[in-house]
Amino acid sequence: MRNDLTQDQIAQYRHDGFLVIENFLSAEELEFWRTALSEAIEKRNGNKMPDRKEVYGKGDADDKSYYDNVFDQLINLWVDNDKMKQVILDERLGKMAAQLAGVQGIRVWHDQALIKKPWANPTSWHLDTPYWSFSDRRALSIWVALDDATYENGCLFFIPESYHKTTFDNPGIGKNMGAIFTIYPEFKTAQSVAAPMKAGSCSFHNGLTIHGAHANMTPGFRRAMTCAYMPDGSTFNGIQNILKDDDIARLKIGDVLKNNELNPLIYQAV
């Protein structure tokens, strides 16, 4: 794993709001991640979450059938698959996230398999953090390509520097690719940057960086494994997202999210 970040990479991430790392995983590591995903998907038997089929705050686009053909989404695979747990709770990933975000501690918010099936719809421009149950401008995600992510099958695109100006307003993922620019018109004429990646490469992006993905214009799959990271000490903002009803009943807005069973602390600077 190419997990040693240079100062130039950290500076680039903080300037642009995203960073691509080519050949992040070795061939053996890539095969392990792929095996973990295949086993985890089979065990889920169609459930998006360990305990339910739907994710709070998702699938709420104007046309649910359209959203459901953007990607297959499975969340918190680490909870019920030992191989995926080994992958997601890797302290090396936590350290990278902490270094990029400039924080002392990192918790897993949730992992997420995002699989574009053959002929899947494009992923419209959106932000990530507004979906989550905390509001921290430093939150970020890793996105690991388990298949080649190409212009043809749905590679990511980013709007550089956008995270410096975006807020927590978000149109969500719907039919209108450019809906986000009604909220952030200053980026309507911005030049996007494509991020095609070979399998085993990865990107990190800030949760307030505007990003999206092409449609899958091929008969093959585009598999990616992602993980959202929460800076330690983040507080509840009232949004349910992955939280269960009994979690919501216990929490008040402003409470620190520190449930180690749901959001394990995977890195803490000494």
Image (spheres, rainbow, N blue to C red):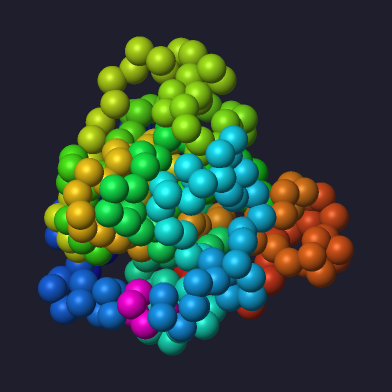
In the depicted structure, whether residue 270 falls above or below residue 12: below
- Residue extending furthest toward the bottom: 82
- Whether 142 is drawn above or below 16: the answer is below
Where residue 140 appears, x then y in whole percent? 46, 49
Residue 38 placement (x, y as % from top left): 33, 77
Total numbered labels: 0
Residue 266 visible in image: yes
Determine the main secondary structure of the stretch shown in magenta. helix
Examine the rendering and report whether any part of residue 196 can be seen.
Answer: no
Out of 108 and 36, give the one closest to the viewer: 36
Residue in the picture at 29% in, 74% down: 33
Viewer-closest of 241 and 100: 241
For the residue pair 237 and 170, the one nearer the viewer reads as 170
Residue at the image point whose x is 42% and y is 28% from the top = 177
Q: Which sits in the foreground, 238 or 47?
A: 47
Q: Measuring from the top left, give residue 101's x and y in whole percent.
A: 45, 48
Quarter of the image where one finds residue 188: top left
Horizontal side of residue 128 vs 70, given as left or right: right
Q: Which residues are magenta?
A: 36-40
Rendered position, 180 above or below 264 = above
Q: Quadrant of the N terminus?
A: bottom left
Vertical placement of residue 206 versus 117, above or below: above
Q: Residue at x 47, y 27 (%)?
A: 176
Q: Is residue 198 magenta?
A: no
Left or right relative to 54: residue 2: left
User: Going by the image, does 24 lie left or right of 71?
Assistant: left
Residue 39 screen position, x and y as percent:
37, 82
Determine the residue positioned at 27% across, 74% down.
34
